[in-house]
Each structure stands twice: as structure tokens, then as C-alpha cells.
Amino acid sequence: MSQWLPIAEIAAKVAGGELLATDLVDQALKTIEEKKEYNAIIAVTAERARERAASIDAAVKNGENAGRLAGVPFIAKDNFLVFGAEATAASNILKGFKPPYQATAIERLEAEGAICVAKANLDAFAHGASTENSDFFVTKNPHDKTRVPGGSSGGSAAAVVLDMAPFALGTDTGGSIRQPASFSGCVGYKPTYGLVSRSGVVAMASSTDVIGPLTRTVDDAALVLEIMSGQDQLDSTTIPRDGTPYTDLATDLAGKKIGVIKEYMGEGLAPEVKERIDAAIEKLKTAGVDVQEVSLPSLPTALAVYYIVCPAEVSSNLSRYDGQRYAYSASGTQNLDESYVKSRGQGFGKEAKRRIMIGTYVLSSGYYDAYYRKAQTVRTKLIQEFVEAFKQVDFLLGPVAPTTAFKIGQNAEDPLQMYLSDIMTVAVNLAGIPAISIPAGESNGLPVGLQLMAPQRADRALLSVAKATEELLL
Amino acid sequence: MKLARLARLDLSEDEINEYRQELSSILDYVTLLQEVDVTGLEPTSQVTGLVNVTREDQVMDYGVSHEDLLRLAPQTLDGQIKVKRMIG
């Protein structure tokens, strides 16, 4: 049982003077301390959180509007720039970096009274599916300390499941919100690409990166999305909202058409995951949903497309870490070039270097057409297949990952094996469509997530069907 | 290793050997894309459909000063970021 009320209720009670933001912050910090053996948290922002809580409590006493998230504590993945703590992206190259500004998403949440209490662990630069690539430590799955929580937003997912705060923020470039939500047992929402500003969030792959909430319920995710989303001058890839709110979701399921993705339900899927997904499908049918099988024949190419496009964009985005303007700078170098190569060689972890090199290779002269250009063209094919599928059905359904949480160390030696855990999530990122992972029960004591997807910009509809499904699966 | 040079990464001999093997197997995996028929299709570079997003060319105050940013640099001189010599 969670110690936190639904987010909207917390805010209402703070605004009404029944709860003090200061007490809520203390509660969060206490739980963070109690659960520290799980290594979910890199740093707490205790001082600043307490200051903000005090000013929110004072504002409430003064009869001022404290915001729709008044006093609600939250935890941000450490690739978000937030005042009061370093922003490391779990990488040694950013250790010690104190942000001079905050992410727009953080500014918007704070403007509505939410309070960041801590920064969560991740795979360094969000490269990974388990937090084993963090340069600092591995986060443990809340259900089984010998297993990973998923990644790259593993710390955020674990924090929510360990009840450290009512919500956490993550990023999803190839599945990094949905997969840890599935492995750890919470809701993880990936919005339509462009809905939430990425200003102030460490960039990974610019054409697929999104920010999203990890929460206990769909309603909570919807409210956080509502506050964060909307065009931002500081991020020219943000799309305008059309006035549709993400709150007060309608939850009628009857007559909705949901397509089960054939390519995700076959050979690679572990039986213990399939059984939970099949059980959920049966409940949807009983509730009057028109469940059909849908095929997107190019899906088996999605992982290859992603592992060309993503490293290519990573190699470009990580070129800014040059040891000259901020963060880690190697000592004892003789000239600028040596300073570049040593700062980067010493500061970056293995996976970052791996991806930078793959990216550099596929973008290099002589290889660009065969790899990068080809991958981006296959991407067009994938996008078209999603568009076609959504002519047949309203939503798509499938598992989030081929297995439940794997053991710490199991995939660490084989990067390609680790990449394969993204097989059911990356296509969504390449297409820029919204998707969600909601808990669908447990198998052998480990959580299994159900994935639902919708067309671009259909976030409200997706959240609605997800909420209805969540109610069904309780 | 030429790639490491292009990427401005200083790698040890051991690292180079390790990466060579790993990169090889990853790149083998992605060559499955060679088989895919993409006749008549254009590459996707972005999924929003946005074109030429602009804003007014005005200095905006985001509450970040020159000093705030300089403070982050490893070495500064007279209000500028100082770097090592480029030649030699």
C-alpha cells in the first residue's frame, strides 16, 4: 500500500492547508534514506526542496494559489538539469557539473508547486536497459535485489515502486521509461514525440528522445503530462497542443478496436510474459473490446534501424563533452587535441564510447549511405506500417519486453544481448507515437507490463484506454 | 584506430581490441537492413512534420549570467574560456 495519496488529492490537501509541503518533503526524504540499499538515488536535493516547501506552505497560508501540484514531491532522472544538485547523467564525464539553468519540464512542474527531492540513477547517458551502465552503481529491482530494475530510467522506476515519491521523471529514447516500468512494476508513459520540451535534459538521440512520467496510476501520469507538455521556445522540436486536456479521462472500452501485434507475440517472447499478456487480452475481450491480430511485417528490422540511427545521433550529441567549457577535463595535457581525446577517453564509460564509435562509423564518408541513410529509409517503411495499422484499429497492444527482469550481470558482458531487450519498444520511438506500460500482474513474483500504443498526438485517447485497462486488470 | 581518432577518444590497446570485436558483431547484426526493399521511399529525419520553426531574434533573459556560465569552465581568463594551445 502506498503512503502517498493520488497526486491531485495531495495538491488539493496542501492547497487546503490540510497537509504541509514541508511534511511531505520530509516523508519523501525519510523513505529515500530507508530504502537506500536499492541504489535508486544518486543525490538528494534536500536543502532546496525544504526551502521550496517552506515557501509553498507560506503561500498557502497567505491565501495564494499554490498550483495544481502544490507540495507534491517528485524525483527526476539524473539526466535532467535541476537546481540543488549536480546533473551527472550517471557519467563520470559530468560528475561535478552544477546546472546553471533547469529543464523546462522542471520549471513547469515547479510553477505548479511540485518539489524535486532527488535525482535518480540511470544507465550513463541513458545508454542501456538495466542501469548496469551507470558509472556509479547498479540499481536493484524492488521485487528482487538480485535483478535489474530495467533501464535506462531504472532508478526512477525503482523510486516510484519503493514509494519514495508520488512520481518520477524519466526519458524514453528506445524504451527507457516503458521497460523499467514493466520490470519494476509501475506505470511508465512515453508521450508523442515533441509533446514535452527536452530543453535542459541531456540529449541522447534527438529524433526519438522524449520525457515522460513514471507513476503508480494512469491518472497520476496524465496529470504530470498535462503540466509538463506544450510548445517551448527553447526546443524547436516541440509541437503545439490543441487544447485537449489529459485529465478527466473517459474510460469506456466497449467497441474500441485494439490490435495485438503479431510480431511481438511469437518466438522470442518468454512464456511467463505471454501468459500475462494473454490474460489481459481475455479481460479486454470480455469488456467488449474488439481485439484483432495486426501485423507490421517490418517490425523485425526496427532494432537494426534503431542501433544505427540512435548511435549516429548519440555520436553527434556527445561531441559537446570536450573538457573545455564545463564538466570533466583531463589534467596534464599539452595541447587542445590531447585535452579533447583524454578528457573524453577518461570521462566516458564503455557503453558511451561504444555508441559514439558505432555512430561515427555509420556516419562516416563511404558508409553513410549504406548504413545511416538506409536505416532512415527503412524507418519510413516502419512509420507507414504503423499508419496503416491505425486505419484498421484504434490502439495497438503487445508486451513491453521479451522477459521479466533479468539478473544483474546476466547481459552485462554481451552488448548485443542487452540491445535485444529493446526489441518491443524501439519501433514506437522511431515512429514518434505515444505508448504506455501498465502493470499486468506478476509471473514468478516479477512484474509484467502491458504495452498500449496510439497514433501520434492521440495521447488523451491512449491515456483513457490505458486507465480503463488498468481498472480491468486490478 | 581511425574511428577513435574521428571521435576524439583516447583508447588503450586493450580497449581497442575489445571494441573491435564488439563493434564487429553489432555491425554484423545491422547489415540485415541491406535486404530490405525501400524502393520509392525517402529517409525520415524527423517525425513532427514541423518546418522552419523560428522565433524573434531578441535576447531573452533566462536568469543565467555570463559569470554563471564561466564559473563552469576549467580555466578562464579575462571573461573568456581558456583552452590549451592548438598547435604543437
Image (cartoon, rainbow, N blue to C red):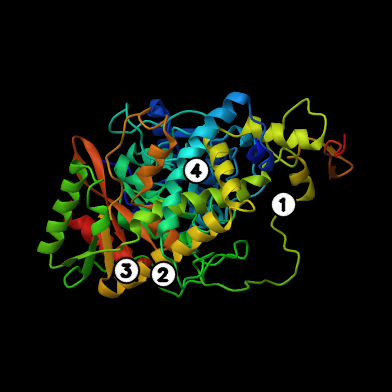
**Which residue position holds label 4?**
A126
State which chain disc 4 sits on.
Answer: A
Camera-nearest label, 1 or 4 = 4
Mark 2 element type: loop
Q: CA distance from mark 2 to mark 4?
A: 25 Å
- Say whether disc 2 or disc 4 marks the residue closer to the N-terminus: 4
State which chain disc 1 sits on.
Answer: B
Camera-nearest label, 4 or 3 = 4
**Which residue position holds label 1?**
B64
The residue drawn where x is 26% and y is 45% is A268
Task: Indicate the position of residue A209 as horizontal and vertical percent values.
Answer: 50, 54
Q: Looking at numbered disc 2 in the image, what kind of residue is underneath it?
A: Arg
State which chain disc 3 sits on.
Answer: A
Q: How many marks?
A: 4
Local packing at callout 3 (Cα closer than 10 Å; few below 14, some 14-19, many 20+) is some
User: Is disc 3 in contact with disc 2, using a CB cutoff of under 8 Å?
Assistant: no
Could one spot residue A209 in this view of the protein?
yes
* In the rendered image, the vertical position of residue A194 relative to residue A189, given as above or below: below
Local packing at callout 2 (Cα closer than 10 Å; few below 14, some 14-19, many 20+) is many
Same subunit: marks 2 and 4 = yes
Mark 4 element type: helix
Q: Looking at numbered disc 1 in the image, what kind of residue is underneath it?
A: Val
Residue nearest the observer in this picture, A219 or A18: A219
Local packing at callout 1 (Cα closer than 10 Å; few below 14, some 14-19, many 20+) is few
Q: CA distance from mark 4 to mark 3?
A: 28 Å
Q: CA distance from mark 1 to mark 4?
A: 27 Å
- Say whether disc 4 or disc 3 marks the residue closer to the N-terminus: 4
State which chain disc 2 sits on.
Answer: A
Same subunit: marks 1 and 3 = no
User: Is disc 1 in contact with disc 4, using a CB cutoff of under 8 Å?
Assistant: no
